[in-house]
Amino acid sequence: MTQRKRLSNTQSSSQSKKRTDSLLGEEEDDVTFTQPSTSQVQRGLEKVTAAQVDQKTAEVVQYFLVKDQKKIPIRRADLVKNVVKEYRNIYPEIMKRAARTFDQVFGLKVVEIDTKNHIYILINKLETVNEAPLSNSTNPKMALLFVILSVIFMKGGVVKENLIWSTLKKLRIDPGVKHDEFGDVKRVVTDEFVRQRYLEYVRIPHTEPVEHEFCWGQRAAIEVSKAKILEFMGQLYEQDPQSWTQQYRDAHSSSTHSSPCQPSTSSQHSSPV
């Protein structure tokens, strides 16, 4: 009996380790990957043909485009592991050529939104941030996202999730009821938009029952214009955007990127939402 129990514990421990290794595998791949130096890249290029580099570049471009269809950010670890593979010693050259292809062929730009974890997205160079593509989008999900981002911005940059749900209910979008257009609204907001890096969904410490709060994600900070949001709110409430003093200052400041889930001083000022 003791021997069987010991064997069971050993198997459980082994399975647990395998699950942990699986979860950490991609992160470990990125930790062990060192960006090659210029001389290393040069030596690497001498060992491959121009056609091989072109082929690998095309594969990287395709990988980005497929991921971008669902607005999923690309991790360098995944890119190296799944696409670049044995060509990792010329990774910088491949990325340089891929970026040139996106620029010249597709009118897209590769942006690293997380320099610590090396996470990339594609943005449309033809739509500057001041054009606020989300607000003009014919995609219902993007319109939903624009509403949520507007509430967060007008409330100072960080809001409790209950405020988001109550706002959506006013628009006849109940997160507890399956929606004809969005399906599971709560999953779209807390999972899909978060994975796409439009939103951050953070647990509030020491709350019982557990509470969460929302703030803008890294992609939203790059793609969405706060000035356009303020202009939209002004039209909606027939009010001069400058009447929201702090929000107006935030929207027109030279630095529009806030720290993740850090409230701005605009939370101290009244807003209509």
Image: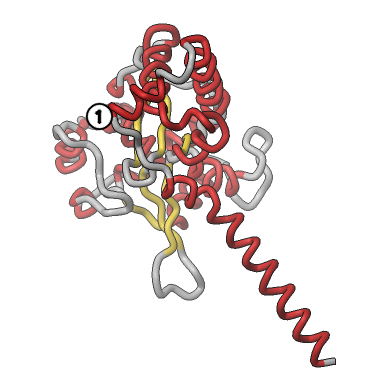
Q: Nearer the viewer, residue 67 or 173?
A: 67
Is 172 above or below relative to 139?
below
Q: Residue at x 40, y 23 (%)?
A: 95
Q: Residue at x 67, y 74 (%)?
A: 13
Q: Residue at x 43, y 48 (%)?
A: 32
Q: Residue at x 55, y 25 (%)?
A: 63
**Residue ranking furthest to the right:** 1
**Rendering coords of residue 270 (x, y %):** 23, 49
Q: Secondary structure at mark 1?
A: helix
Is 187 above or below relative to 43?
below
**Rendering coords of residue 242 (x, y %):** 16, 33
Residue 6: quadrant of the picture = bottom right
Q: Is residue 24 left or right of residue 90?
A: right
For the N terminus, which image quadrant? bottom right
Q: Nearer the viewer, residue 80 or 61?
A: 80
Residue 1 shows in the view: yes
Q: Nearer the viewer, residue 73 or 97?
A: 97
Q: Is residue 76 left or right of residue 1?
A: left
Which three-letter amino acid code belongs to the residue tagged 1? Ala
**Rendering coords of residue 112 (x, y %):** 35, 33
Which residue is the site of mark 1?
227
